[in-house]
Structure formats: C-alpha cells, structure tokens
C-alpha cells in the first residue's frame, strides 16, 4: 500500500507525501492506535502539533512501527507546529525540543508556525492563557521575529523544513520580505465550501505548497452546528462519488490531491483511515474540480474566533 503514495516537492528540493494522517481532535487513548493503523495502511506522513497535546502517543506509535521493522525513520514525514504561547524567539527552540521529546525523534521533517497570532506564555502546557477576567492574554510578538528563530532550527538540524499555517496573503508577503530559509508550506482550511483559490494561486506563485486541513469541513468539531454545510451528504458530492466508484469522503480528499494540494484527513477508525488513503486512486478532471467549486459559499469551519481581537488575526471578521 505504501507504494501508492504520491509526492510533492518543496522549494528546497525535499519531498513530502501528498496525503497524511491528521491528528487534531484525536482523543487521548486513540491516537497511538490510529497512527499505527495509518502506517500499516501505507501512510508515510503524519501531521501533528504541540497544541494537540497528543504527541506522546504519536511518538509511541511511530516507535512501535520503527521497532517492528514496518518503516525506517527516513520513510516517514513528520510534521509538528509551534503554538502561539511559544512564539517569542526565546521559546521557539524549547517548543520544538518538547515536541521532539514527546515524538521520540531527533528531528522533524516540517516545523510550522501554527498561526501568526502570539499569546502570553504562562506555562509550557497552557495553550490558551486567560486573565482573571477570562479573556485571552494576547501578545504582540511579531511573527517575523518568530520566523527568524525558526530558521536557526533548520541550521541546527532539528527540522529539515519550515513553514506556516493559517497565514493570509498579506502576512505571507511580510514574511517573504525577511525569510532567508524558504517558506515551504502554508497549511490552511480548504474544501469545496471555501476553496481559497486566490490564496492557493499566490502560494503557487511563490513556490509555497499548500496543505488542506479539515477537508470535510470538520463536522466533528465541538462547535459544529446543524446549519453548517454537510459535505459528505451533499447531493452533488454523493452523485459525483457514485459516478467515480468511490465514497464521498474519498472524493473530498481527492479534490485536493488532484490539484497538487496536500491533504491530512483525520480519523481514529482503522477502516476509515485505510479508505481515506485509497483516495489516491480517485482521479478527477479539471471539469470535476470546477463542478465541486460551485459549492463555494465562503464557509469557514475553523474561524479561530477565540482570538478574533488579535492584531494579527488572519481571517476577515
């Protein structure tokens, strides 16, 4: 199954599997089994983050698969992210050190700035710091300063590549002005209901790859509403999936893969993890993509509204 993997190439020449396993929202006690199932199914790309607070289980799963000979370290592409409370340049290296310790690794393949928004650092594991009034404690650390600190970690061999997540075009332009190490990735929410064509075209023009998170519209998130678009049950999606001989979920994953956009669907169910991987077999034409693009309605499942007053909030209110 691993031979099915398709790859994209970063601007620095390194390769990354197009499909990966997402681990956001995966509950404690389920992550290890999910990651092991993914590796057995052929995945060679695991997407994680410090803020998910489950990297210890990701690390335990990877170690088990390394120890039993299923994979070698060089076979795997491992991503982690820097959360807002660790964006001060003095904290950036420690954040990656903590992730590496949990992952039981000497380096990661990709280290992303999780967003352009810094918040106060009270404690390493306090990812949503609030004051006595229960309001978020924002910080004004420039993301350009954070980036410069991340660049040093490439030099130290702690990560092979660096990138960002949830950055808009103007923020990318500011970062490009000072970046000495290539920005290889911008990981953003993407699906037919918010296809972000302008952002994706800008990234392509600057040799920045795009990864789509929440490719199904994140229907399992805690704040989901019955009024939200349900992509898996959408009539067009179901009709197209049937015509392609695949599931609606596979079609939604293929929507990205067939455009050269990386995709990291999340699941903790081994059968679904395997089904998602088989989206690599689904081929969509430009006309198919255009049909799915008609679902665009500027629907953002993850608006990051918990920090919507932040000066660097990346999305329009």
Image (spheres, rainbow, N blue to C red):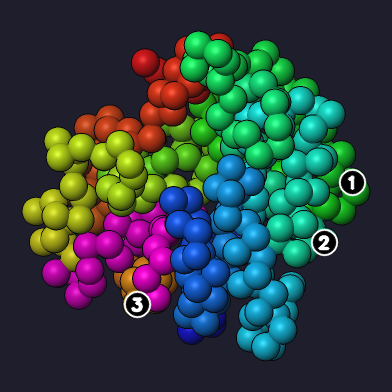
Placement of the C terminus among the 4 image quadrants: top left
- Structural crowding at the residue carrying mark 1, measured as other residues with C-alpha within 10 Å and reported as few (<14), some (14–19) or many (≥20): few
**Labels 3 and 1: the sequence-earlier one:** 1
Query: Could you tell me which secondary element the residue under label 1 belongs to?
Result: helix
- Structural crowding at the residue carrying mark 2, measured as other residues with C-alpha within 10 Å and reported as few (<14), some (14–19) or many (≥20): few
Q: Spatial distance from mark 3 to mark 2, Cα to Cα? A: 31 Å
**In the image, residue 44 above or below residue 108:** below
**Labels 2 and 1: the sequence-earlier one:** 2
Rendered image quadrant of residue 217: top left
Instruction: Report which residue position mark 3 lands on.
Output: 271
Instruction: Report which residue position mark 2 lands on.
Output: 106
Instruction: Report which residue position mark 1 lands on.
Output: 155
Q: Residue at x 70, y 32 (%)?
A: 123
Q: Position of residue 15 (x, y in %)?
A: 66, 62
**In the image, residue 137 above or below residue 204:** above
**In the image, residue 189 above or below residue 33:** above
Q: Is residue 309 left or right of residue 207?
A: left
Span highlighted in magenta in the image: 242-270
- Structural crowding at the residue carrying mark 3, measured as other residues with C-alpha within 10 Å and reported as few (<14), some (14–19) or many (≥20): few
**Labels 3 and 2: the sequence-earlier one:** 2
Between 135 and 41, the one nearer to me in the picture: 135
Q: Position of residue 225 (x, y in %)?
A: 20, 37
Q: Residue at x 69, y 75 (%)?
A: 63
Q: Spatial distance from mark 3 to mark 1, Cα to Cα? A: 40 Å
Q: Position of residue 99 (x, y in %)?
A: 72, 51
Query: Could you tell me which secondary element the residue under label 3 belongs to?
Result: helix
Q: Is residue 225 left or right of residue 66?
A: left
Q: How many marks?
A: 3
Q: Residue at x 11, y 61 (%)?
A: 239
């Amino acid at each position: 199954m691993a031979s099915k993997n398709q790859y994209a190439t970063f601007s620095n020449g390194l390769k990354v599997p197009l499909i990966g396993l997402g681990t956001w929202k995966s509950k404690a006690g389920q992550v290890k089994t999910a990651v092991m199932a993914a590796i057995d199914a052929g995945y060679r790309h695991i997407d994680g983050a410090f803020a998910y607070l489950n990297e210890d289980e990701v690390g335990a799963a990877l170690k088990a698969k390394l120890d039993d000979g299923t994979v070698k370290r060089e076979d795997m592409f491992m991503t982690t992210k820097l959360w807002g409370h660790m964006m001060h340049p003095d904290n950036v290296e420690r954040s990656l050190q903590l992730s590496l310790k949990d992952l039981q690794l000497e380096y990661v393949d990709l280290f992303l700035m999780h967003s352009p928004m810094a918040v106060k650092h009270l404690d390493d594991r306090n990812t949503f710091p609030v004051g006595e009034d229960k309001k978020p404690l924002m910080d004004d650390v420039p993301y350009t300063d954070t980036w410069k600190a991340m660049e040093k970690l490439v030099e130290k061999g702690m990560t092979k590549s660096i990138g960002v997540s949830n950055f808009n075009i103007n923020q990318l332009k500011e970062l490009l002005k000072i970046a000495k190490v290539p920005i290889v990735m911008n990981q953003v929410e993407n699906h037919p209901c918010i296809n972000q064509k302008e952002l994706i075209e800008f990234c392509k023009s600057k040799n920045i790859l795009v990864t789509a998170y929440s490719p199904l519209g994140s229907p399992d998130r805690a704040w989901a509403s019955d009024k939200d678009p349900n992509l898996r049950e959408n009539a067009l999606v179901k009709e197209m999936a049937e015509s392609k001989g695949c599931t609606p979920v596979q079609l939604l994953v293929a929507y990205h893969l067939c455009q050269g956009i990386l995709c990291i669907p999340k699941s903790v169910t081994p059968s679904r993890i395997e089904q998602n991987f088989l989206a690599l077999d689904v081929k969509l034409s430009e006309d198919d993509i255009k049909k799915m693009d008609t679902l665009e309605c500027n629907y953002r499942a993850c608006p990051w509204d918990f920090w919507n007053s932040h000066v660097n909030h990346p999305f329009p209110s």
